[in-house]
Image (tube, rainbow, N blue to C red):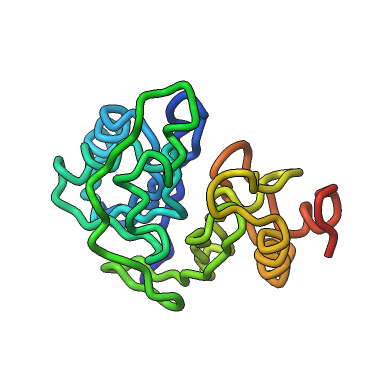
Amino acid sequence: MEDINMEFTRLTLGQLQTNGYIISENGQAVLVDPGAEADRIIHFLTEQDLTPLAILLTHAHFDHIGAVDALRSQYRIPVYVHPAERKWLMDPKLNSSSYFPLKDIKVKPAYATFELGKMKIADFTFEVIHTPGHSPGGVTFVFEKQSSLISGDCLFRGGIGRTDLIGGDQQTLLESIRKLYQFPDHYNVLSGHGPKTTIGYEKKYNPFIKE
């Protein structure tokens, strides 16, 4: 039976402490938001004897894409992003790296784009839902059998994503979070920064948006 032994490993990466996730099962893995420190990610995959199959991006801000080229070159795997942000990987203004005191981040284009709804990569089955607001192409990955959401920079424990970068819009973000609030309270929320939380906790305690 698929999905029984699926594991979610969080690696906190780079100067902005971005959460990258390695979702693994039966010796295979998908990588979510490898924001930096490609060598560290490769070391983990090698140590755990995991074969990565794809890179999934919740959105294309620089702190979520910094290790993409190194990993894509190492493993020859596709990179998936929402169509609205396909060009962002190669544009420091769009991916916002040019607005921070860091070097400009330029990553080769993502040739694979998400179709919203159910998605299957080998034995990994999940749903892709559009959750814009922090950025126009923000998506959340829903792992129903594991009662888990990977929300990128949409929803945090006790917080919400910033909306002052290109394409950000607070009202749109709040609408996206309300969409996430429709999931059961026990669902885990694995965010792009900070600790994990649950839908129930955020509905009760998040000061920015109530149910």
The answer to which of 110 and 4 lies nearer the viewer is 110
Quadrant where the N terminus lies? bottom left
Q: Position of residue 128 (x, y in %)?
A: 47, 69
Query: How many circles with numbers are drawn on the protein?
Result: 0
The answer to which of 138 and 191 lies nearer the viewer is 138
Residue occupying the point 74% across, 64% down: 185
Q: Which quadrant of the figure has residue 131?
A: bottom right
Residue occupying the point 43% across, 46% down: 94
Q: Position of residue 95 (x, y in %)?
A: 42, 44
Residue 177 position (above or below residue 51) = below
The answer to which of 55 and 197 lies nearer the viewer is 55
Q: Position of residue 170 (x, y in %)?
A: 70, 55
Q: Position of residue 134 (x, y in %)?
A: 59, 52
Residue occupying the point 23% across, 61% down: 111
Residue 176 position (above or below residue 101) = below
Quadrant where the C terminus lies? bottom right
**Relative to 53, 196 lies left or right:** right
The answer to which of 202 and 15 lies nearer the viewer is 15
Residue occupying the point 40% across, 58% down: 85
Q: Which quadrant of the figure has residue 28?
A: bottom left
**Relative to 98, 174 lies left or right:** right
Residue 120 position (above or below residue 164) = below
